[in-house]
């Protein structure tokens, strides 16, 4: 892949893109960067590249003919040409991945009051902004774009696996990281990270990423994962509002007092009458026995239907 940057100050771009990870990637031939001086295509003896705006106003505007001449020296049929300006499309990780699939990206850096609007209207494929703020020039935006795109290319990063869990690569922000010392000035790392339990560590990181996203970037927060469906038995133990489960067989609850004020035995909810007797809980209370017997109306019906002796 190749980047070509058109700028009035090529030395601003060349230095940072020749150091650290990107510098090593360029030396290894994983991608190329060309920095081109727009002033080389300026007009007249003084290489003029800008002029006053039509209609009046402050500042100077870069000329369309100068930009067009410079672009013609680097543009190819497969080129994706970008213009950096505040009114452009917001640059993000999705756009970085999109550009990483392009064989050739050309970036035109605005400066001064701006660039003649005919550059945007007729010469470029996209206008790109890196945020809602104003810089002294588009060179900083160009470096951000090159860095974000180049690091996605195969071999540029030493550990390719680190791309998979980064912020904005996965939904939301990334989980926090810790390293030695384990304790510093009384600040402890989360104990789970030294538990050796990979499942617990993965679960902690997932929840930490969600919590960080909710706190810092709620606009990126995902819906909380749905709880797994309850079993039929668990559903029977759930109250009407579904807010909590009633005690299971392993737990006991105290029943209400009977009519004369004495407390009834404490018994498991799932215990059968036979089990209650074996545990010494005694027979069921009289009211329960009364409820179990047929009502007078039902008994009368039974007697009428029975054959006479």
Image: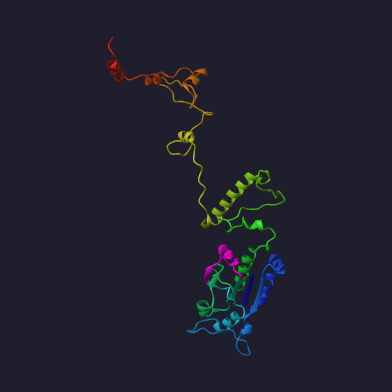
Is 59 or 226 nearer to us in this picture? 226
Is 23 or 265 nearer to us in this picture? 23
> Residue lying farthest bottom?
45
Residue drawn where x is 56% and y is 63% of the image: 94
Q: Position of residue 292 (x, y in %)?
A: 38, 20
Q: Which residues are magenta?
A: 87-103
Is 24 or 181 nearer to us in this picture? 24
In the rendered view, does 209 fall on the left or right side of 194?
left
Q: Position of residue 218 (x, y in %)?
A: 52, 56
Q: Position of residue 219 (x, y in %)?
A: 51, 57
In the rendered view, does 73 fall on the left or right side of 260?
right
- Quadrant location, the C terminus: top left
Its colouring scheme is rainbow
Residue drawn where x is 49% and y is 35% of the image: 234
In the rendered view, does 218 fall on the left or right side of 198?
left
When the figure is inspected, residue 216 is found, relative to residue 34, above or below; the finding is above
When the figure is inspected, residue 74 is found, relative to residue 198, above or below; the finding is below
Q: Is residue 290 visible?
A: yes
When the figure is inspected, residue 145 is found, relative to residue 291, above or below; the finding is below
Residue drawn where x is 49% and y is 84% of the image: 54
When the figure is inspected, residue 166 is found, relative to residue 70, above or below; the finding is above
Is 159 or 91 nearer to us in this picture? 159
Q: Is residue 136 visible?
A: no
Say if the magenta span includes residue 157. Answer: no
């Amino acid at each position: 892949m190749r980047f070509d940057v058109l700028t009035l100050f090529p030395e601003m771009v060349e230095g940072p893109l020749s150091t650290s990870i990107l510098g090593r990637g360029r030396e290894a031939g994983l991608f190329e960067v060309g920095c081109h001086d727009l002033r080389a295509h300026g007009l007249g003896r003084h290489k003029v590249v800008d002029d006053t705006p039509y209609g009046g106003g402050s500042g100077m505007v870069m000329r369309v003919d100068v930009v067009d001449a410079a672009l013609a020296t680097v543009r190819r049929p497969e080129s994706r040409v970008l213009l950096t300006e505040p009114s452009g499309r917001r640059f993000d990780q999705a756009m970085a991945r999109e550009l990483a699939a392009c064989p050739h990206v050309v970036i035109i850096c605005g400066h001064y009051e701006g660039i003649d609007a005919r550059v945007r209207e007729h010469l470029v494929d996209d206008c790109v902004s890196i945020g809602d703020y104003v810089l002294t020039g588009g060179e900083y935006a160009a470096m951000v774009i090159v860095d974000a795109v180049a690091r996605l290319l195969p071999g540029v990063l030493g550990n390719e696996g680190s791309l998979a869990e980064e912020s904005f690569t996965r939904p939301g922000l990334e989980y926090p990281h810790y390293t030695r010392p384990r304790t510093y000035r009384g600040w402890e790392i989360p104990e789970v990270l030294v538990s050796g339990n990979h499942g617990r560590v993965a679960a902690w990181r997932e929840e930490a990423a969600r919590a960080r996203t909710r706190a810092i970037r709620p606009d990126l927060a995902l819906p909380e994962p749905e709880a797994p469906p309850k079993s039929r038995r668990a559903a029977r133990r759930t109250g009407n509002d579904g807010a909590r489960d009633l005690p299971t067989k392993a737990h006991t609850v105290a029943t209400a007092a009977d009519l004369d004020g004495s407390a009834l035995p404490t018994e498991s909810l799932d215990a059968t009458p036979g089990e209650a007797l074996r545990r010494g809980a005694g027979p069921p209370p009289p009211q329960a026995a009364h409820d179990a017997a047929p009502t007078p109306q039902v008994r009368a019906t039974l007697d009428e239907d029975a054959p006479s002796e």
